[in-house]
Amino acid sequence: MTFAWRAAGMNYLQYSSIAARALRRVAKSELQPEIAKRQGMGIKAAKWENGKSGLPTPVSTIETRPRAEN
């Protein structure tokens, strides 16, 4: 069984980003201020070397990776 988002050629982060955007659009007007507070969150990544973490840096975009051929 393949998930619909995987069959569409997306990774999970792309799928969840689209779903969140759709949810924000249809939310009730009284919830919009609360949703706007959470909209600015992002992802940070750190490179690990010799068992120690480097400085976390913001990830500006969700990069796509080539699909694995089965």
Image (cartoon, rainbow, N blue to C red):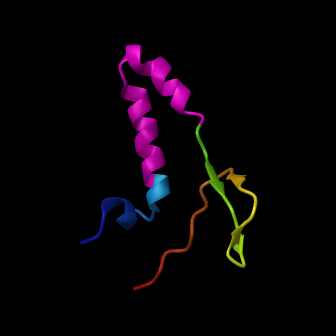
For residue 51, what is the image quadrant?
A: bottom right
Side of 38 relative to 50 (left or right)? left
Queried whether the magenta region covers residue 22, the answer comes back as: yes
Residue lying furthest left: 1
Where is residue 69 drawn, in percent x and y?
45, 84
Where is residue 62 drawn, in percent x and y?
59, 56
Residue lying furthest front: 51
Where is residue 50 drawn, in percent x and y?
72, 79
Residue plotted at (45% across, 20% down): 32
Q: How many marks?
A: 0
Where is residue 35 drawn, in percent x and y?
47, 26
Locate the N terminus by quadrant. bottom left
Segment colored magenta: 15-40
Q: Between residues 39 and 65, which one lies in front from this camera angle?
A: 39
For residue 23, what is the image quadrant?
A: top left
Does residue 52 sit above or below 17 in this rendering? Answer: below
Q: Between residues 51 and 37, which one lies in front from this camera angle?
A: 51
Residue plotted at (70% across, 70% down): 52
Q: Main secondary structure of the magenta part?
A: helix
Q: Between residues 53 and 9, which one lies in front from this camera angle?
A: 53
Residue plotted at (65% across, 53% down): 44
Residue plotted at (60% across, 34% down): 40
Does residue 22 sit above or below 37 in this rendering? Answer: below
Does residue 39 sit above or below 67 in this rendering? Answer: above
Locate the C terminus by quadrant. bottom left
Side of 10 relative to 46 (left or right)? left
Queried whether the magenta region covers residue 39, the answer comes back as: yes
Does residue 63 sit above or below 43 in this rendering? Answer: below
